[in-house]
Image (spheres, helix red, strand yellow):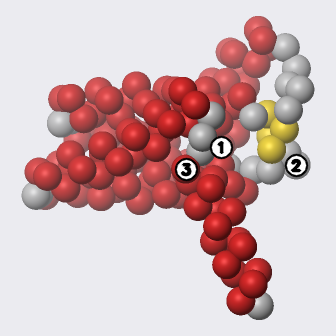
Amino acid sequence: MDIDVRGPRFGAALTTVVLAVALVTASAWVLAWQTLAFALGAAGGVSRSPYGWLFRKAVRPRIGPPTEFEAPEPPRFAQAVGLLFAGLGLVGYTLGPDWLGLAATGAALAAAFLNAVFGYCLGCEMYLLVRRVTVRAE
């Protein structure tokens, strides 16, 4: 079942804010929250993440029905990529080295920002590239 394209973009906007706070404060706790949000989005799809729930319950009823839809697999893959980077950042902030926390959090922030502001989902594009390569290999 396809999803409302506005949901992942809303989630990316919230993710951008959370990751910016995590990066500026170097807070493992803030990054842990975002890591959990990514994990839920990767496991159940973006509509099952906390930000997807918030979009569905609080935002979507106020902005009307969707006019565009997208397949759920690319955003779900993007959540898994975000989970990887947030997890690496969490390791860096808690166990070291500090630069790993900063670099991984910064990379996740850059990707979320691209989606939130420009509608360019880097993880989604990675998903499509992987699909093209694997389909050709078969």
Residue type at mark 2: give it. Met
Mark 1 / mark 2, whichever is N-terminal:
2
Asked whether, in this view, residue 96 is left or right of residue 12, the answer is: left
Q: How many callouts does the rendering have?
A: 3
Q: CA distance from mark 3 to mark 2?
A: 22 Å
Callout 2 crowding tier (Cα within 10 Å): few <14, some 14–19, many ≥20: few
Q: Nearer the viewer, residue 84 or 32?
A: 84
Mark 3 / mark 2, whichever is N-terminal:
2
Residue type at mark 1: give it. Val
Asked whether the beta carbons under mark 1 and mark 2 sit within 8 Å of each other, the answer is: no
Mark 3 = which residue?
122
Quadrant of the snapshot with the C terminus:
bottom right
Vertical order, 24 against 74 (above or below): above
Q: Residue furthest top?
A: 62
Asked whether the beta carbons under mark 3 and mark 1 sit within 8 Å of each other, the answer is: no
- Quarter-wise, where is residue 28 in the image? top left
Element under label 3? helix
Query: Could you say where residue 98 lies in the image, as x and y percent from the top left?
Result: 11, 51
Residue type at mark 3: give it. Leu
Mark 2 = which residue?
1
Q: Residue at coordinates 64% horizontally, 62% vertically from top-left? A: 127
